[in-house]
Image (spheres, helix red, strand yellow):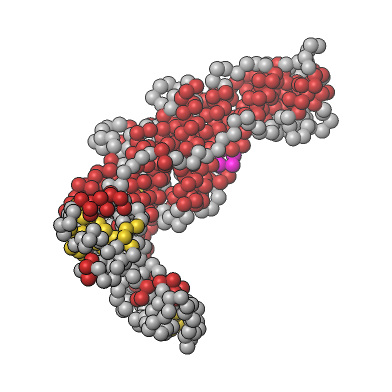
Amino acid sequence: GCNPLAETGRSKLQNQRAVLNQQILKAVRMRAGAENLLRATTNNKVREQVLLELSFVNSDLQILKEELEGLNISVEVYQNAEETFSIPLVPLGLKETKDVDFTLPLKDFIQEHYSQDSSEYEDEIADLMDLRQACRTPSRDEAGIEMLISYFLQLGYVENRFFPPTRHIGVLFTWYDSFTGVPVCQQNLLLEKASVLFNIGALYTQIGTRCNRQTQAGLENAVDAFQKAAGVLSYLKETFTHTPSYDMSPAMLNVLVKMMLAQAQECVFEQIGLSGIRNEFFTLVKMTQEVAKVGEVYMLVNTAMNQEPVKENIPYSWSKLAQIKSDHYKALAHYFTATILCDHELQPGDDEDQQEKALSQLYDYMPEGLMVLAVLKDKVQRKQLGKAHLRKAIVYHEEALRVCGLCKKLRNIEVLQEVLTAAHKRSLLKYAQQETEDDFLSLIQAPDILPKTEHKIETIAPQFSKVKVKDFFHKLGPLTVFSAKQRWTAPRTICLHHEAGELGFSLKGGSPVQIYCLDPVCPAASAGLKEGDYIVSVGGVDCKWLGVSEVLEKLQSVGKQPVEIEVISCQDTAASLHSKSATYSMGMQKTYSLICLAMDEDKIDQTKKAPLKLPFLSWGTKNRQKAASTLCLPSAVAGSSQMKKKLSPFTLFNTESSLY
């Protein structure tokens, strides 16, 4: 990652964000304490003092929220350093987090779950923590994106290795909301993964705003970055649907995706007009529809930002900037249409049909009494309709300037004021160049312009597969076998003796290899080898990643000498789980379950299908994870594992104990 002490504009903003997050956390705790005291006390004097304190705390929180909003609208820090005459684009700030120490929880889990020496994995744990620390200050380029994606993919390995679905291992993740500054603390790794995804999308937006919008390549990169940002945020919305943070709620992410696509559409328009807009009929028609499309998408963004519950948390200046851009680009659409009508009279050599078709595509309807072909041929009608479009353009320009002047944050952005003022003056000058004697007779209302684009903007889904990462904890073995979801016995040492060149068993599977067709009377079986055991080492050499041929080669390489192998067995937990339960929780805080056991005979012929005996209570199965307290009896179910799975709905519980 970048040097966290580097005094860049972006690092200063992130440091200010971190300080504000701490202040907001303190104020939130004070408010929670005051509210608890208010509910607990009956003393009127104390209640008055608490209410007064609450008013101060709420005011302080509002001020801090406004300061955080000011950081979110500090768009000039993220823009390209060169002088530009373009409306600023809005980036997302990175979510802040606290340090996380993986050392003790992961070492304990390795010792307990995998029965391995945890000291051998200190370097791997340190690498994981270093990568997380670096992801807090990623560089604003593809290298920063790749680093964040590599950590996100590494979290997938960590989740499967160390986070069982039935319990927490004691790692607490804290992330601050990007808009409200309120912290979210959970032991769930999904919060970490979702927050990293959000930061990937946020970093793409910062890359997009940093691109030089005065060059063709810069605009192409900006469009690509905003499309990728929208793709990551859309993936986050679809994958993590119950995130506890406001900035990652489905409604907020939906708005952010729309905003990124709108900014990509804006860059596409700038890309088309970068080399200059020729004052030619068909070129102006194309530009009119393109710029009308930009105005339409920003109008939709502004509408979405003003809907509940997003309205309460989205920065006020963002919604106003979307409104300003919508009005500004609608005004440009009307200005271009007026230029078409006022500057391009139908000449004898012009193609009337083509011009009529092109102009009719701009309108959903024509003003009463006007026809497209008649307007093209009649100089007076052309001028009247053109002036109507100019009047509408001026109204939109003035509205954009008015909204910009009312927003404290936006009126301090000089380049925004300059762009809006220049466009307004251009429309006024164009209107002044037209004859004004017949203004009082002109009652034509300019129709709306139909938006259309030849460059459809869509989200670009994240390409995680392009980033190759290696599992830090590769030494634990293949993830399909050695995961947190499966429980294993501690490694057992078996001494193998060759008898007439035979081992007494076969091997199957990939890596690790599995004992197959074990002869029950062979010396290996007598030494404790079981059918289905996995071989994890041969002669002290780790072989979790070796195939059948490689393990056989190692076993045969020792000749007739005894060789020690280490094997592990999968712990079958189905016997300690249960088939049906009846739950009674009528207004009680705890839930008591009566376990109804299906008793089968001790021995069932494997070729016959075991009949399922009905329990004496045939109530439906309940999810035991929802029960606050459950007393269970040991199951007496015997038979095939398939039968056990059918009887037990609680396949996630891995325990040998019969009491929970």
**Residue farthest toward the front in the current orientation of the protein:** 500
The answer to whether one can see residue 426 in this image is yes
> Residue, x 37% and y 73% (percent of image)?
574
Q: Is residue 339 shown above or below 534?
A: above
Q: Which residues are magenta?
A: 298-302
Answer whether residue 590 is magenta in the image: no
> Residue, x 74% and y 25% (percent of image)?
359
Can you give x and y, in whole percent of width and height, for residue 207 in the image?
41, 32
Q: Nearer the viewer, residue 265 or 320?
A: 265
Q: Nearer the viewer, residue 420 or 183?
A: 183
The answer to whether one can see residue 49 in this image is no
Instruction: Tell me: 304 left or right of 155.
Output: right
Instruction: Tell me: 645 left or right of 278.
Output: left
Specify the quadrant of the image occupied by residue 534: bottom left
Magenta region, mostly helix, strand or loop? helix
> Residue, x 30% and y 50% (percent of image)?
549
Can you give x and y, in whole percent of width and height, for residue 326 in the image?
58, 35
Total marks placed: 0
Q: Is residue 283 shown above or below 622?
A: above
Answer whether residue 300 is magenta in the image: yes
Quadrant showing the C terminus: bottom left
**Residue farthest toward the bottom in the current orientation of the protein:** 616
Specify the quadrant of the image occupied by residue 390: top right
Specify the quadrant of the image occupied by residue 520: bottom left
> Residue, x 57% and y 17% (percent of image)?
276
Q: Nearer the viewer, residue 590 or 169?
A: 169
Q: Nearer the viewer, residue 27 or 362?
A: 362
Quadrant showing the N terminus: top left
Can you give x and y, in whole percent of width and height, for residue 213 in the image?
47, 24
